[in-house]
Image: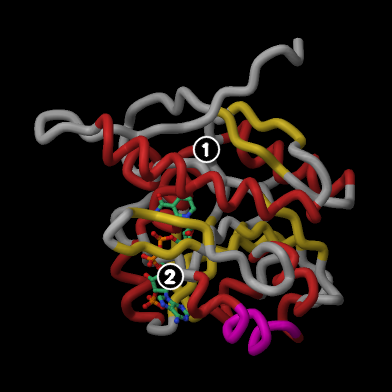
Amino acid sequence: MTQPDPVGILGGTGPLGRGLARRLGAAGVPVILGSRDPARASAAAEPLPQVTGDSNEGAAAARTVIVAVPHAGHAELLTALAPTLAGALVIDCVNPLGFDKRGPFAQPPPAGSAAEEAAAILTDATVIAAFHHLSAELLDSDVPLDTDTLVLGDDRAAVARGIELATLIGINAIFGGRLRNAGQVEAFTANLIAMNRRYGTAERKAHAGIRITGLA
Ligand SMILES: NC(=O)c1ccc[n+]([C@@H]2O[C@H](COP(=O)([O-])OP(=O)(O)OC[C@H]3O[C@@H](n4cnc5c(N)ncnc54)[C@H](OP(=O)(O)O)[C@@H]3O)[C@@H](O)[C@H]2O)c1
């Protein structure tokens, strides 16, 4: 049997990157966790089967690359990696959010969304958007993932690859529209975090997710 193509994760040492790496690795997909500090990436990868650590540049050399950095470092990192990411499928999961004393709120960039910002920078890559509403904590656990994820993009083959990866890790993935619709998907994460804060308790943390109905 041929080995599946590796997936690189930029900012793979964070909760989302580690959670996705754990699930992808468990599904037999080789993962390269990227970091600004390759030693930190190697330490994060060490307990995870099929997962290795590297620089972000090393992770970007994979032909499918997940972007899992905070929005504050997003444009700068992608600009630096644009030559390496040429020709890659880039899956952006970044939610540009702010937090103040009233809670979380959407802070979209001038491009309209982090994903469109990525597409404007990575003109030689194919950018799709996915995984915005997943809980990193649930990903980084053994519980079944009882949730949907929306996969957005303008390239059908790229969206299909995003859906395939989500399906491999046990998530029901649904085409969510073209990339120009990513802004409201990213922004909705602020609502989910507000729900978690309202409905979570000291005994039981909440992990709000989405479920789309009426399609079948
Ligand atoms: N956490 C979730 O449940 C969740 C769910 C869905 C989507 N997201 C989105 O996914 C992204 C990652 O989330 P996270 O919670 O894993 O984030 P995070 O822990 O804040 O950051 C992830 C990693 O990004 C790197 N990083 C931090 N600042 C950076 C900068 N200025 N430039 C380049 N790299 C930087 C760090 O790795 P190194 O220091 O090792 O380089 C860090 O470990 C965010 O945009 C978030 O909105 C998160």
Q: Residue at x 43, y 40 (%)?
A: 192
Q: Residue at x 57, y 46 (%)?
A: 131
Residue 25 magenta-highlighted: no
**Residue 78: within the magenta?**
yes
Locate the N terminus by quadrant.
top right
Q: Amino acid at mark 2?
A: Gly
Q: Identify the secondary structure beneath mark 1.
A: loop
Alpha-carbon distance for marks 1 and 2?
18 Å
- Percent x, y of residue 215: 75, 15
Front residue of 171 and 186: 186
Look at the image and tell me whether residue 124 can be seen: yes
Judge by depth and name the residue closer to the eye, 123 or 107.
107
**Residues rendered magenta in the picture:** 75-82
Residue topped by disc 1: 27
- Residue 48 horizontal/vertical position (percent): 36, 52
Q: Which residue is mark 2?
A: 53
Q: In which quadrant of the rendered view does residue 83 lie?
A: bottom right
